[in-house]
Each structure stands twice: as C-alpha cells, then as structure tokens.
Amino acid sequence: MTFRIISDSSSDVRNLDNKLYKQVPLTIIADDVEYKDNQELDIKKMQMSLSNAKNSGTSCPNIDEWMTTFEGADNIFVVTITSQLSGSYSSAVQAAEIFKEKNPNINIKVIDSKSTGPEMGLIIEKLDQMIEEGLSFQEIADNIVEYQQKTRLLAALSSLDNMAKNGRVNSALAKCAKLLNIKMIITASSDGKLELVTKVRSQKKFLNTLLEQMNSNGYSGGKVKVNHVNNPILAESIQSLINQNYPQAIVEITPCQGLCSYYAEDGGILIGYELK
Ligand code: X90
C-alpha cells in the first residue's frame, strides 16, 4: 500500500523528508511570460518582471497536470488552495474522477484546504504524520476533516493590489491598504473566503495585534508556520513573540513560493496555526 500526498504550489511545502510528497505548480503570468511555480522558479526574477509588467495574473493546474502525479500510488491525498479563490480544487476533483474510472481500486481524497500557504502546510504535515503512524486511508480521511476544524490562517499584507487586479478582493479594500504604513490583517473564513480582520499602523502594535488575534481564536501553544515574502526579520519577530508567550510552541519559518509571493506581495506574511 503506497501512500502519496499531493498539493498545488500555494502550500509553500517544497518537500517532505520522506518521498511521499509531490507538488503541482500554479502559474504566474507577467504580460506574455509564464512562470511555473516549481522548484526551479527564480522568485526574485519573477518579481522583477512582475514589477515591470502591464498585466499580470495566475492560473491553476489543469486536469492533466494533476493526473500525471497520481500514477504509482494506491492511497492518495490531494490538498488544494481554497476553492473559493481558485479553480485548483475543481480541476483536482475532475482529475481524480477520471483517474478512478480507469483505476477503480485506487483511493483518492481531494481536500479543499479552504485556505492556502502555511495552513495547507499544517494539513500536509498532519497527513504525513498519520501515514507514518500507520493509520488506514479511511482513518486519515476522517481525522483530517476534524483537524481542519482546528487550524487557522492569518495574513498581514501591505498591498492587496494583485488580489484586487485579479478580482479576488474588492478594490475599495485594496485602496485602503495602499495608505501609508497600513497593514491589513486578513484571515480565511470557515468557508474559505478572504475576510478582513483589522488594519494596523505601528509595527509594535502590529505584532501584538497578531498575537491577540491568535489568542482570541483559541491559540494556546500549538504548532505554527510563518511563511513570508522576503521578510525573514518580521517572521523571526513573530516567532520570538510567540515563543515568549508559549515557550514550547514549535514555530517554523518558510519563504513563500511563487503563488503566495505574487498575492501576498513583497514583505507579506502568512501565519498558519493549530488550536488545541
Ligand atoms: O487559480 C489561481 O489562479 C490562483 C488564485 C489564488 C488567489 C488567492 C491567493 C491568496 C494568496 C494571500 C492572502 C491570504 C488570504 C487567503 C484567504 C483564503 C495569499
């Protein structure tokens, strides 16, 4: 019985220690140039070309791209970015249906993360842990639904321009974020939509606001993943603040891949965290 975990590249999970994981790239488009969000992507170069581009956008993996990753495993878990903001989930579901028609004995569960980035990372690592523990496909499929009730996402962005440009957030909210020094703290709602939490100005207040938000959602020292767009310093400040308050908490820092770098924009931070 071979297990496999597959996700689109919005997860920012580049690999796992074992060989169970495969990633399917989304695509970032700057004018006529397409950047596949794979391990070879030079994010700095992509950002340079985006900053000079008149038009930009993204596209999700197609059915064939998902299908090529299914071959050779019996039990497959697919994790996608929220179906509310991308076609990735729907294309993975269709790929799974077609594949299962030809291979009826293969188990495939497609999971809508209702989120992205580090919250997807938490889901992927939990799947990995349950596979390592020897749970059955069905047990893992049931448990992961429960686990998803206990994870959250916060994101702090200084610009929502690319989200607005692509119709993923309303433009009034994006204009608001443009005002000097304002950071928007946003979250993924329980049904996977983008939701504004609050706006903050000062850096000191900003960090405390993030922690207050986590606490008020029920955070009490669980695992945290902090993903950043060229902002390791802010990621480390968040890590130390969490560890000052919860010394046992595991807080991992990861640079964003291409898709999240495009939408979270330079300096952006995404925080995925576990509730107890
Ligand atoms: O299919 C596609 O082209 C991909 C579209 C993705 C659009 C949203 C990406 C968001 C990236 C920034 C903010 C986090 C908030 C997420 C709320 C669910 C990350």
Image: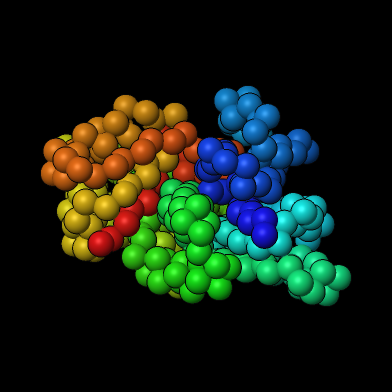
Q: Determine the residue positioned at 76% across, 65% down.
A: 95
Q: Is residue 73 left or right of residue 148?
A: right
Camera-side residue of 151 and 88: 151
Residue 257 percent coordinates (x, y)? 55, 38
Q: Determine the residue positioned at 16% across, 45% down.
A: 246
Residue 23 percent coordinates (x, y)? 65, 46
In the rendered image, the vertical position of residue 188 relative to residue 250, given as above or below: below
- Count of numbered labels shown in the rendering: 0
Residue 232 percent coordinates (x, y)? 37, 28
Q: Is residue 233 left or right of residue 38?
A: left
Q: Determine the residue positioned at 50% across, 52% down.
A: 132
Q: Quadrant of residue 112?
A: bottom right
Residue 261 percent coordinates (x, y)? 52, 39
In the rendered image, the vertical position of residue 194 relative to residue 51, given as above or below: below
Residue 223 visible: yes
Q: Quadrant of residue 56?
A: top right
Q: Determine the residue positioned at 76% across, 36% down.
A: 33
Q: Quadrant of residue 106?
A: bottom right
In the rendered image, the vertical position of residue 40 relative to residue 106, given as above or below: above
The N terminus sits in image quarter:
bottom right
Residue 195 visible: no
Q: Residue furthest right?
A: 102
Q: Residue furthest left?
A: 245
The C terminus sits in image quarter:
bottom left
